[in-house]
């Protein structure tokens, strides 16, 4: 499916942001304004409606702590235009090699941008784009500095490549609005999980899917997630965080694709019972 174009000045709806997101932003604001506690904190501007509002995931037991999911392959971090172009060439070579064995290639996709905390501030541009197509390499592109060169744009608009992630339509809309690049063929992991697991209205987060499907936790420390993604150069922890998110999207898609649809499973069960 394809993301709809954003009209000028449109964004996401602050009221539809999950409690987890709101709590993270409130914590970040408290830290930023610790020196002036008497000053009244204001929230960001309205960001337009979002069909993918996430609910906080409730673990089975508060005592359960899963091992951390990490990306163990090679991370290719690129910052300048030339570096992003070179990284895209490398990524395309990996994709072409995969085409020899499969017709359907999925790309774990995610973006990061610097958050805003005050009403009336203009939303920041997408600053980082991360792409993963296997367990060996993950590409973290600092597009805030490089922009999106034509070769990378062609890859994003390639309708033979399925871009996967949670609430990925919102990310695609932001890239369209910020960079005028239309990312084509999207698969939302939350909707896919519902089809495979027999849920109908559940809104999965990437973290809750990781726990459900792999018994691993996807760490989301606020000091990284809500950090400065427009920095001159990303820190090692930022690069690892970004890469792991894209890898998690790619990997969880592979896991979900291996499941039959819940409707098919129910049909087979009824046939065997009859």
Image (cartoon, rainbow, N blue to C red):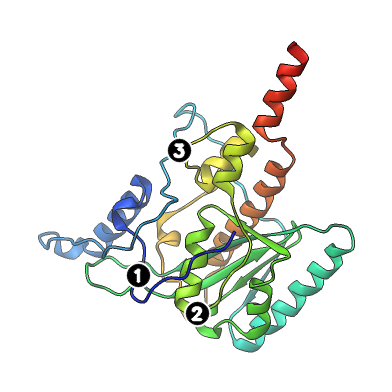
Q: Residues within 10 Å of mark 3 (few under 14, many from 20)?
A: some
Report the residue at 28% width, 54% height from top.
26
Q: Going by the picture, which residue comes out furthest to the bottom?
A: 82
Report the residue at 12% width, 61% height from top.
40
Q: Measured along the vertical axis of the image, is residue 83 above or below residue 119?
A: below
Q: Which mark is residue 179?
A: 2
Mark 1, secondary structure of its residue: loop
Q: CA distance from mark 1 to mark 2?
A: 14 Å
> Which residue in the structure is indicated by mark 1?
10
Q: Is residue 244 visible?
A: no
Which tag is nearer the camera, tag 3 or tag 2?
2
Instruction: Give the quarter of the image for residue 153.
Output: bottom right
In the image, residue 9 lies at what x, y percent? 33, 74
**For the residues bearing labels 1 and 2, Cβ distance under 8 angstroms:** no
Q: Is residue 98 left or right of residue 9?
A: right
> Which residue in the structure is indicated by mark 3?
57
Q: Residues within 10 Å of mark 2 (few under 14, many from 20)?
A: some
Say which of 187 and 247 sits in front.
187
């Amino acid at each position: 499916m394809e993301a709809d174009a954003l009209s000028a000045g449109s964004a996401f709806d602050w009221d539809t942001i999950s409690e987890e997101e709101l709590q993270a932003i409130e914590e970040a604001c408290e830290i930023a304004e610790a020196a002036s506690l008497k000053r009244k904190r204001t929230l960001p501007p309205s960001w337009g409606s979002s069909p993918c509002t996430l609910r906080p995931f409730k673990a089975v037991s508060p005592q359960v702590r899963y091992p951390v999911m990490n990306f163990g392959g090679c991370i290719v971090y690129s910052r300048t235009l030339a570096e992003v172009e070179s990284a895209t060439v490398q990524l395309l070579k990996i994709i072409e090699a995969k085409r020899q064995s499969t017709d359907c290639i999925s790309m774990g996709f995610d973006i990061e941008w610097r958050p805003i905390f005050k009403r009336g501030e203009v939303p920041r541009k997408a600053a980082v784009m991360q792409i993963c197509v296997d367990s060996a390499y993950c590409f973290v592109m600092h597009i805030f500095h490089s922009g999106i060169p034509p070769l990378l744009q062609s890859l994003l608009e390639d309708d033979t490549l399925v871009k996967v992630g949670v609430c990925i339509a919102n990310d695609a809309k932001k890239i369209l609005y910020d960079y005028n690049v239309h990312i084509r063929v999207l698969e939302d992991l939350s909707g896919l999980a519902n089809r495979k697991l027999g849920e109908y209205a559940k809104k999965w987060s990437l973290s809750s899917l990781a726990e459900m499907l792999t018994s691993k936790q996807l760490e989301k420390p606020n000091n990284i997630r809500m950090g400065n993604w427009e920095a001159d150069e990303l820190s090692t922890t930022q690069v690892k965080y970004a890469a792991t998110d894209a890898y998690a999207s790619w990997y969880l898609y592979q896991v979900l694709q291996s499941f039959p649809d819940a409707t098919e499973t129910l049909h087979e069960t009824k046939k065997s019972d009859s």
